Image (cartoon, rainbow, N blue to C red):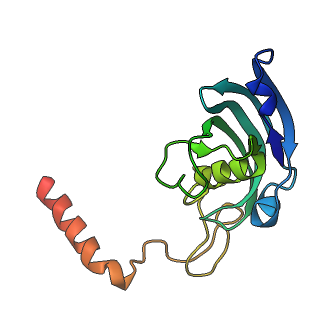
Amino acid sequence: MKIAVDRLFHPDVAALEIEQNVRLAGDLGDRYPDGVFVRAKISRIRHGVHIEGTLRGVERETCARCLETFDRPIAIEVAETFSEDIAPGEDAAATVSPLVDRHIDLTDLVSQLLEVDEPMAPLCSPACKGICPMCGINRNVAACECAGDGIDPRLAGLASLRDEAESETI
């Protein structure tokens, strides 16, 4: 979705208000099935425009601990500058984005902001107990009979260092 901002370059228009639901394609469309609501104000600056506002939506996510799907509400602040002085392709090193033909690609901007906001390991809850590495049961749903104190043999050396450090501090 492209937004024409050429009206802002006339003296009688100070700003444009946007209230738009943006539907995304591909993986982002799957993660945000209801789209993302954008509320923003676009103002003219010297040689370009500045957009400021918020994105709100609900992301369909998978918990990194228990592997269950959950809804993660998002609210992202938007503050992006577009300049006619930046040519397309030169924006990788620039702190502003290019303003091409006096249009802003809102879908591209929203996609970039959502990808940056994506957590490395999303959790359904900070208290999520995850799945048992032995039997695979979701510990949030039921308890298992597996031995919980088993140390992975690959980490046994670190466990002995931990125990040694604890005994020295006592």
- Is 16 placed above or below 147 here? above
Measuring from the top left, give residue 117's x and y in whole percent. Answer: 60, 49
- Is 135 placed above or below 57 here? below
**Which residue is located at x 62 percent, y 25 percent?**
45
Measuring from the top left, give residue 82's x and y in whole percent. Answer: 63, 39
- Is 3 placed above or below 90 here? above
Left or right of 157 on screen, residue 48: right
Q: Nearer the viewer, residue 159 or 41?
A: 41
Figure quadrant of residue 89: bottom right
Left or right of 146 on screen, residue 12: right
Measuring from the top left, give residue 137's x and y in whole percent. Answer: 67, 74
Which residue is most to the bottom?
153
**Which residue is located at x 20 percent, y 59 percent?**
166
**Which residue is located at x 23 percent, y 73 percent?**
160
How many numbered circles are shown?
0
Q: Nearer the viewer, residue 50 or 164?
A: 50
Left or right of 100 on screen, residue 159: left
Measuring from the top left, give residue 74's x and y in whole percent. Answer: 70, 43
